Amino acid sequence: MIQSKIAGTGFYVPDNVVTNDELSKLMDTNDAWIQERTGIQERRHIVKDSGDTPATMGAKAAEMAISRAGIDKSEVDFIIFATLSPDYYFPGGGVQVQDLLGIAEVGALDVRNQCSGFIYGLSVADVYIKSGMYKNVLVIGSENHSGGLDFTTRGRGVSVIFGDGAGAVLMQPTTEEGKGVLSTHLHSEGKYAKELALIGPSTLRWVPEILEANDPEDISYYPYMNGNFVFKHAVVRFEEVIREALDKNGYQASDIDLLVPHQANLRISQYIQKKMRLRDEQVINNIMKYGNTTAASVPIALNEAWETGRIKPGDLVCLAAFGSGFTWASALIRW
Ligand code: UT7
């Protein structure tokens, strides 16, 4: 039986490190608050006009994943690109990656599931590969948050959390018994769409009206997050969707070798870890260095886990995410 496996991982983050102290020069915040509430010490921000964009960063992460998979980029036969911050309103970033990598006219699909976007994308790649339709599928998560955040005190509840960067995997078929993606689990609850959303740039308002208003106080152009509300749902849904993946495959929490949670907030990861009685070595957290990079956070953390030897062949790896939509998702993988 054909299963899909992750054959290579990659990542790219902008060089520009922004510390909590630097943010406190822009708004009424401080290192102690940010670390205590989120665990974040620093994040990366794109330098304007540096050439880093979600598409270019995604392409760089993808190149690393392709080379680690040991294939030539000409062998990639499908691209899946997850982001909430595309370079353009349309077209999506997947076609830009196809162009930037200079590969043949393969299909490119954009996924708009925010923090869960990478796992949603991985689930699509999994099914394509299992069906025999494609053999070398790129799944990319990439974000430019910093260009769209309110760095005044008004926006501090959101702007200190998010960071920029990209992560990618190259997925391939395997016939090795019991190896690869064992199952994926996807959920949504659209009644909470507005609890974490960017409403301004939308078709609900007509462009001529917006241009005429030209209102610098229009905060609908900044993301809105009902932080406490999102937090309370996140801790419930993370655990649920991880347990769903374990139950489906007849495993228990103690069987997980590594949980790679979406890096939403260190407190959320720690809560899940405690609730599921996982040991420190069973969970990877790197939000301290990168902040919350939404669709990029799972592949960036997965890449770090692989690079630092925290994932070994045969390990049981669980990916899980929750975020805007609300959407939440998990994937259980035998590495
Ligand atoms: O990525 C996927 C989805 N996102 C998440 O999962 C994020 C979920 N939510 C969270 O991580 C947390 O709710 C936050 C980190 C966003 C906020 O933490 P919190 O402990 O829920 O704080 P809070 O919103 O209840 O705010 C507490 C206080 C408020 O002041 P008052 O009203 O108590 O005087 C805020 O105005 O902290 C204030 N505050 C800040 N103070 C310093 C809010 N942001 C800041 C800040 N610096 N950056």
Image (cartoon, helix red, strand yellow):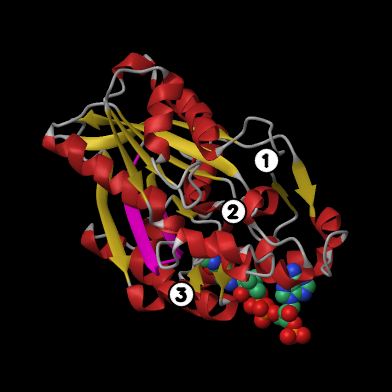
Q: Quadrant of the N terminus?
A: top left
Q: Residues within 10 Å of mark 2 (few under 14, many from 20)?
A: many
Q: Amino acid at mark 3?
A: Lys
From the viewer's perspective, is residue 213 above or below residue 58? below
Q: Tag 1: residue type?
A: Ile
Circles 2 and 1: CB distance less than 8 Å?
A: no
Which residue is nearer to you in this view: 212 or 248?
212
Q: Going by the image, does 138 lie left or right of 183?
A: right
Q: Can you tell me whether the CB of the residue at mark 2 lies under 8 Å from the nearest atom of ligand 1?
A: no
Residue 175 location (% of width, % of height): 18, 30
Write down the residue under mark 2: 285
Is residue 306 shown left or right of residue 120? right
Q: Quadrant of ligand 1?
A: bottom right
Q: Earlier in the sequence, mark 1 or mark 3?
A: 1
Which one is earlier in the sequence, the residue at label 3 or at label 2? 3
Q: Which mark is residue 194?
A: 3
Main SS, magenta residues: strand
Residue at position x 73%, y 72% from top? Answer: 154
- Residue 117 or residue 40, whichever sits in front: 117
Disc 3, SS: helix
Residue at x 75%, y 55% (from the top left corner): 41
Residue at mark 3 to residue at mark 2: CA–CA distance: 28 Å
The count of marks equals 3
Assess whether residue 328 is covered by the magenta stretch: yes
Residue 201 in sight: no
For image coordinates 69% across by 31% down, the residue present is: 50
* 164 on left or right of 272: right
Say left or right for 36 vs 197. right
Give the extent of the magenta segment. Answer: 319-335
**Nearest-to-viewer mark from 2 and 1:** 1
Q: Amino acid at mark 2?
A: Asn
Q: Which residue is mark 1?
A: 46
